[in-house]
Structures are given as C-alpha cells and as structure tokens.
Amino acid sequence: MLRRTTTAAATVALTASLAAACPGSQCTATRIANAYEVYSPFVLAVLPELAPETIPGIAVDLGLFAADSLAKYVIDHKVKPGKTWLLIEQTLGGRQQTSVFELSTDRDLKVSVNGAQLDHVDLYVRQRQIKVVVPAGTGAKVAVTDAAGGDSVAVRGTVPKDLGGSQDLETGKTFHHSLFKDDAPESSAADVRYTKYVTGDPELINGTVAARYSGSDQPTLGACMSTPSAAWSGKLQGWPGDKNSAWCVKTGAGHYGLAVHKSKNGIFFGSTKDMDGLGYLLWAQPGLPAAVVPQAKIKKC
C-alpha cells in the first residue's frame, strides 16, 4: 500500500558551480537562450514494482541497471557536457534497480520528491548526477524544474518561413492566404505573417509591435514591459540579426514575449522545417496563464 504524507517536498538543486560559465559579453547569447529555451519541467510518476517512464523529448531513457552494471556503465559513459543524469533507485522484484535518464541541459535543476515516507527518500548530487532513492514498496512523484525560476512561460512556438499566411501567437492558430490576403475573418487575431514564395522578413500585423533587445542580461517580462514607447516598431528592426539578437514583442492582444531567428548557424535551432522561421515565447501574464506542467505517462501492467 502507498502511504501518503503531508510533509513538504524535499528538494535538491545543482549548485551554480556546476553550470557552464561564460565571460563578459559572451554571456549575451547564453542568457537569451536561457530565456527562450527554458528547460521544460516534468513530473515523473514512480510506482511500486514498476520502472518509471519519461516524457519523450524531455528525458532520454538510458536503461534499467543493477548496482554492479550501473557502476560499470557510469565509468564507461561519463556524463557529457551539457547533460545531466537523473537516477531513480527502486526495489523491483526483490532487487535494487536503477533507472537512468539523460536530461539534455547544463542548467541548474531542482528535483522535488513528493509521496510516501518522504523522510526516507535520499537525494544526492554528484558530477551532474541526481540520485533519488525510493524505498521498497512505495511510490513517489519526482518533479524536475529549473532552479533559477524566473518568469513563467505561457506559450512557446515557431512561425515557419514557408507558412504562406499568418499566425496568432497566443494560440498558434494559422490562417492561410491567397493573393496576399488572409482568407479567414478570424485572421484579425493573427500577429505575424510570412508570405509564401516571397523572400523577406516576417511581417508584424494587426497592431503587433517589436523592439530590438539591447541588454546584456537575460531578457525578462519586466524588461520588455519597461521598454520605452519610442523603441517599439511595427517591424522587426534588423531582422534576422545574429545569434545574440532577440526582440521583445507585444501582440495585438497586448501580451509580451520574446522573438528570435531560428537559425542553424546560431543557438536557436530546432527541426529542419523550422529553420529561418521566427521562434517565440509569450510570458505568463493576465489573460495568459502559465503552461501546465505535463504529467508523465504511466506504464500499466
């Protein structure tokens, strides 16, 4: 039986000394990336006698190991730069087994463990390896989040260069066009347009404006909201810029966010189909709640 407690979550954070450092102005690109490519939080359900599963694309399952085989694996496969390992030790079939997951981030992470017998759950941090020990016959929920905290993000997305129409940044809904006009009446909610077969910059429409981000620190909701009115423009000035370039955006609906050029030569890259598109996020603000943390899928017997 899984016994539950009301004890507050136990947490551990990787210290700042483990994070990748960068000198002076070279930090600009990293800080913009930190605001845009925020590490996706996830919740991992650990059930008695079942090895946990993770959310595809967020954590890579490296396998289930017994103590001796894990020791050999750790020696043979050192944690690569920019990676973190999450190790969850359980008793499965009367034997101690460890599920190993690779997290593609060098950011500082916080791991919270909720569930039964929290006082018996041990956490370790060593060489970017986070180990969670779950007592036999019990279960827990392991939440992995960004230790740095910061502004919550409501929406992330990409406006592809070959869209051939316009897109509403809040909802991600697209409206295709003919003869340079959007067909759907609802397209009045759109914020960015890419005209198919015409080489050019993304257009800001329906009252959406942008301001080139010039700070050397991490872009924030507060920084974008406090941008002087004279700096805002109906165009993405200087697009596409370089890997240090970012733009504060204010949608036609009044929501603030950040836009970048999705470039294979810079730090903002993704799938091939998104290359040269406009990558963006909208921060959580009134009328735009923070995105819900996804729940891991549970493997059933």
Image (cartoon, rainbow, N blue to C red):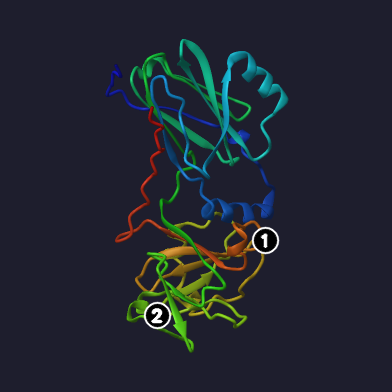
Give the quadrant of the N terminus: top left
Residue depicted at x 33% and y 20%: 116
Q: Residue at x 33, y 55 (%)?
A: 289
10 Å crowding of disc 2: few (<14), some (14-19), many (20+): some
Looking at the picture, tell me which residue is in the foreground, 264 or 108. 264
**What residue is pinned by disc 1?**
264
Give residue 13's position: percent from left, percent from top.
50, 31
Quarter location, residue 240: bottom right
Q: Is residue 210 above or below residue 120?
A: below
Q: Secondary structure at mark 2?
A: loop
Q: Are marks 1 and 2 in contact (CB under 8 Å)?
A: no
Q: Element at badge 1?
A: loop
Q: Is residue 99 left or right of residue 6?
A: right
Quarter of the C terminus within the rendering: top left
* Numbered tag placed on residue 136 in the rendering: none
| Three-letter residue code for mark 2 | Asn
Disc 2 marks which residue? 206
Q: Nearer the viewer, residue 292 or 95?
A: 95
